[in-house]
């Protein structure tokens, strides 16, 4: 089948898709790079010409930069840990034969279908509201003073919301991985005298290694860009300003496109460093 | 050491009864083979003994102690699975040492036993490899190695050779038999292949739909099959089963004649037919004879030098002293 002729035809037919995707990616990237070397203030004089690396230096020099990187990493790291630990436990649970399995599985996956903005609003108003939220009622029921979540425990709140959103994804991937485990391996381990915890540690967890690596990789890429959840809840105050949010503020609130673009380039670099680092881990897992 | 007694054991999966009440005793040191067609409940029976399935009713005793409610790890049995069930992320060494590690044995003793098992099984050069880098036969040996290091009171094998090619199967069959001779430990071996059963077993248990059809030594089963099912299952090629007037002549509903108990001739014999297929194996020749009026096809074994061909007219004489007779219920008439 793979004659010279058919290969050329295949390339020709692929070309539109490849060109479209490349354009899709390259145009914004080039524009970001372009703007990052300019003083560009849309409301205050527009394009004020080239400024070299000024924007880059200013962005890093700002007192908000390093805290925002730390905030970003804390959110990404915490959400990863929470979703993977709970995801593994949930996957183990959902793998057990039980009544109403199909419905339960759909329910567990449901949060993934809720838009980030909507879920953040639901959490903010229905759970975390210090007066009317469910948590406030719960706290009062036990005689405690309700917490005003978004200001007193802002990071915890954001991490909770984002974890809730990504838990279904992790659970789903890990569940399929658990289901692909040969049950005879577990039975062999059982006969070899391994108690349940050892079976988990020696057989199930290593089997899940690959799936966990993939979850980490994919989630990291998406979590670096978390935005709606912060925009809807804390607006970046109370120490929840991530790199993405900082860029947003520079571009839209300060109307400084050049400075924001420089921040965007930093974000790309950060994402790539993380991606390379994570690919290494995944690669190691795929080796065997 | 490894005497296993089943008393009135049954197993049902929901509505379906896979094992109806069953009694069986496996003596210490015996090589017992469970044989029967696919789906007859051999694996289920083995898993009941292993403790991987719970009995629906009845009792299991191992070494004279009640084991019905014991967990698999407490029964001191080792199992070799059909899929080998090796741990893919561990090296061969770690795989073999796993049960010892779980038992909390000290490192030096673990090392000693693994080394010894590896040398017995020719795995010494492969100890640092992972199962994925081994051939089927080597994986099989690792699975056996993992079983023997524990020094269990009995070994359970579930169709261990069915994933191997024919030549390797014969080799591994010999190795397992040798291992049994050397260790003298009870072994229970499940197979659907009656050749494996005949060649390896001290005692064969023939199963059909969860029922024990007959228990006995290979030759006992060969010479005195208790019913038509065992007669047709044991022996290769299978016994010719003949019904109708020819059987009535022997006062039986069915008579059975083994292919090796029929002599062929070009000219004389009570039965006659035409050769449909002749299979020349060199040492033997098998003729499949049609048109005898006895059964659709009669199989005959003759010496390798006998040269009838397709379409030849052929006469058959059964050896009168080894005709098996069965009654209306399919049971043997003594
Ligand atoms: N976990 C199970 N649930 C329901 N039916 C089962 C289960 N395990 C085995 N069976 C049924 O029990 C019968 C015997 O199975 P098995 O012991 O595996 O047969 P064999 O090993 O002799 O081929 C089969 O009909 C099979 O469908
Ligand atoms: Mg089976």
Image (cartoon, coloured by chain):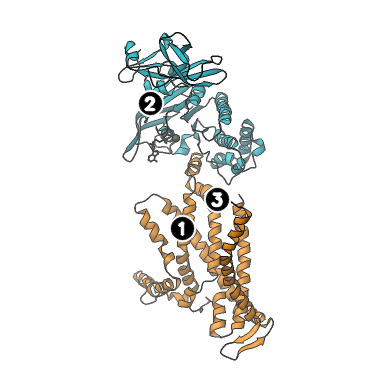
Chain colours: A orange, B cyan
- Residue B330, image quadrant: top left
Give the SS element for disc 1: helix
Give the residue at mark 3.
Answer: A206
Give the SS element for disc 3: helix
Query: Closest to the observer: A97 or A2?
Result: A2
Q: How far across and down, in percent of the image, does residue A8 sit?
A: 62, 59
Which label sits on residue B212?
2
- Above or below B54: residue A221: below
Which label sits on residue A172?
1
Give the SS element for disc 2: strand
What chain letter is assigned to the residue under label 3? A
Q: Are marks 2 and 1 in contact (CB under 8 Å)?
A: no
- Residue B13, image quadrant: top left
Asked if both marks, 2 and 1, belong to the same chain, the answer given is no
Asked if both marks, 2 and 3, belong to the same chain, the answer given is no
Other residues around mark 1 within 10 Å, as few (<14) / some (14–19) / many (≥20): many
Q: Are marks 2 and 3 in contact (CB under 8 Å)?
A: no
Task: Let me know if residue B219 appears in the view.
Answer: no
Q: How far across and down, in percent of the image, does residue B139 sit?
A: 58, 37
Q: What's the CA distance linking mark 1 and mark 3? A: 18 Å
- Above or below B257: residue A18: below
């Amino acid at each position: 089948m793979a004659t010279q002729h058919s290969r050329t035809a295949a390339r020709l037919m692929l070309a539109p898709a490849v060109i479209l995707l490349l354009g899709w990616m390259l145009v914004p990237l080039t524009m970001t790079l372009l703007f990052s070397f300019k003083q560009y203030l849309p409301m205050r004089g527009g394009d004020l010409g080239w400024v070299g690396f000024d924007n880059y230096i200013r962005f890093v020099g700002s007192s908000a930069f390093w805290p925002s990187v730390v905030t970003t990493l804390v959110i990404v790291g915490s959400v990863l840990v929470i979703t993977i630990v709970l995801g593994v436990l949930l996957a183990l649970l959902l793998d057990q034969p039980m009544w109403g399995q199909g419905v339960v599985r759909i329910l567990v996956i449901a949060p993934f279908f809720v838009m980030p903005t909507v879920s953040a609003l639901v959490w903010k108003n229905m759970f975390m509201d210090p007066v009317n939220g469910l948590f406030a009622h719960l706290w009062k029921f036990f005689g405690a003073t309700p917490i005003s979540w978004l200001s007193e425990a802002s990071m915890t709140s954001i991490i909770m919301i984002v974890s809730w959103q990504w838990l279904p994804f992790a659970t789903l991937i890990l569940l399929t991985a658990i289901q692909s485990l040969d049950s005879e391996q577990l039975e062999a381990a059982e006969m070899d005298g391994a108690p349940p915890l050892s079976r988990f540690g020696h057989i199930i967890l290593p089997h899940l290694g690959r799936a966990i690596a993939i979850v980490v990789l994919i989630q990291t890429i998406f979590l670096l860009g978390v935005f709606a959840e912060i925009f809807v809840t804390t607006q970046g105050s109370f120490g929840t300003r991530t790199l993405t949010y900082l860029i947003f503020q520079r571009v839209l609130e300060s109307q400084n496109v050049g400075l924001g673009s420089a921040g965007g380039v930093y974000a790309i670099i950060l994402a790539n460093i993380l991606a390379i680092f994570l690919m290494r881990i995944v690669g190691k897992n795929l080796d065997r | 050491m490894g005497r296993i007694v089943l008393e009135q054991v049954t197993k049902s999966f929901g509505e379906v009864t896979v094992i109806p009440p069953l009694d069986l005793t496996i003596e210490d040191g015996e090589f017992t083979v469970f044989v029967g067609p696919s789906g007859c409940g051999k694996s289920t029976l083995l898993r009941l003994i292993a403790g991987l399935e719970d009995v629906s009713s009845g009792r299991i005793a191992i070494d004279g102690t009640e084991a019905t409610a014991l967990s698999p790890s407490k029964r001191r049995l080792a199992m070799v699975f059909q899929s080998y069930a090796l741990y893919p992320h561990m090296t061969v060494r770690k795989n073999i040492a796993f049960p010892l590690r779980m038992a909390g044995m000290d490192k030096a003793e673990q090392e000693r036993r693994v080394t010894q098992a590896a040398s017995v099984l020719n795995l010494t050069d492969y100890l640092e490899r992972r199962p994925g880098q081994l051939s089927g036969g080597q994986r099989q040996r690792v699975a056996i190695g993992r079983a023997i290091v524990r020094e269990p009171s009995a070994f359970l094998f579930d169709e261990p050779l069915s994933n191997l090619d024919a030549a390797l199967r014969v080799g591994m069959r010999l190795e397992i038999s040798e291992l049994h001779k050397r260790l003298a430990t009870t072994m229970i071996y499940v197979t659907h292949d009656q050749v494996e059963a005949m060649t390896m077993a001290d005692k064969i248990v023939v199963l059909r739909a969860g029922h024990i059809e007959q228990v006995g030594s290979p030759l006992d089963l060969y010479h005195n099959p208790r019913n038509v099912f065992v007669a047709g299952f044991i022996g290769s090629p299978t016994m010719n089963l003949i019904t109708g007037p020819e059987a009535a002549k022997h006062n039986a509903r069915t008579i059975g004649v083994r292919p090796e108990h029929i002599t062929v001739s070009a000219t004389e014999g009570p039965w006659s037919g035409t050769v449909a297929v002749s299979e020349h194996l060199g040492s033997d020749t098998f003729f499949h004879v049609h048109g005898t009026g006895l059964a659709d096809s009669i199989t005959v074994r003759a010496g390798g030098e006998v040269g009838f061909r397709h379409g030849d007219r052929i006469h058959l004489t059964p050896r009168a002293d080894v005709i098996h007779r069965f009654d209306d219920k399919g049971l043997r008439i003594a």
